[in-house]
């Protein structure tokens, strides 16, 4: 995350929701990794473990991209960051759907994350309209 965040930006609802999504995805991933880290009987690893890491990386990138869009002066660069937020959100949602097919007790928490992503998309829509 960026070190010195202006207070008016840290109070943005979309920024706060991005931080909530990051915390939630990190907790879900760490919970799921306990189930997915074990090798299968044939010695291979569960490929879903990579999706659990992906949700952390993607959710971690949301808040900084929002701040970059807010702080950017030039319209074309601002829209690149906005597009990046949209792509990250879509990938996060898709990886949640993929993880729901995994053999882990943590799949029970993924609908909560998807619900938060839907709320985020609504905030994102109104946020984009202000640019």
Image (cartoon, rainbow, N blue to C red):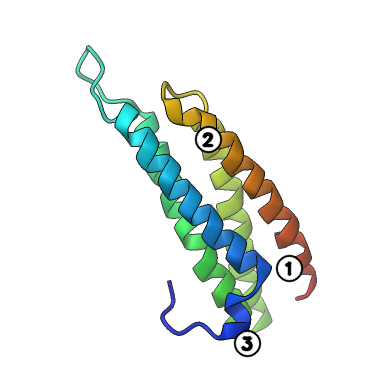
Residue of label 3: 73
Question: What separation in Å lies between label 3 and label 1 (alpha carbons)?
Answer: 16 Å
- Of tags 3 and 1, which is closer to the observer? 1
Q: Are marks 3 and 1 in contact (CB under 8 Å)?
A: no
Q: Residue at x 70, y 61 (%)?
A: 124
Would you say 49 lies left or right of 28 here? left
90 shown above or below 44: below
Identify the secondary structure beneath mark 3. Answer: loop
Residue 72 seen in the figure? no
How crowded pointer 2 is (Cα within 10 Å; few <14, some 14-19, many 20+) is rated as: some
| Residue 95 at x, y percent in the picture | 51, 38
Choose top left, top right, bottom left or bottom right for residue 78.
Answer: bottom right
Question: What separation in Å lies between label 2 and label 3 (alpha carbons)?
Answer: 39 Å
Q: Are marks 1 and 2 in contact (CB under 8 Å)?
A: no
Disc on the earlier residue, 2 or 3: 3
61 shown above or below 98: below
90 and 105: which is toward the camera: 105
Identify the secondary structure beneath mark 1. Answer: helix
Disc on the earlier residue, 1 or 2: 2
- Of tags 1 and 2, which is closer to the observer? 2
Residue of label 1: 127
Image quadrant holding the N terminus, namely: bottom left
Identify the secondary structure beneath mark 2. Answer: helix
| Residue 115 at x, y percent in the picture | 66, 42
Residue of label 2: 109
| Residue 35 at x, y percent in the picture | 33, 27
Residue 90 seen in the figure? yes
22 shown above or below 100: below
- Of tags 2 and 3, which is closer to the observer? 2
Disc on the earlier residue, 3 or 1: 3
């Amino acid at each position: 995350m960026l070190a010195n965040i202006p207070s008016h930006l840290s109070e943005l609802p979309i920024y706060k929701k991005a931080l909530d999504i990051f915390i939630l995805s990190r907790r879900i991933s760490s919970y799921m990794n306990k189930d997915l880290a074990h090798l299968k009987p044939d010695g291979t690893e569960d490929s879903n473990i990579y999706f659990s890491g992906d949700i952390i990386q993607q959710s971690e990138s949301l808040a900084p991209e929002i701040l970059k869009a807010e702080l950017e002066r030039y319209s074309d660069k601002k829209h690149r960051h906005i597009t990046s937020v949209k792509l990250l959100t879509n990938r996060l949602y898709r990886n949640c759907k993929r993880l729901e097919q995994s053999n882990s007790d943590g799949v029970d928490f993924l609908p909560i994350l998807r619900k938060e992503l839907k709320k985020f998309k609504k905030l994102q829509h109104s946020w984009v309209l202000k640019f």
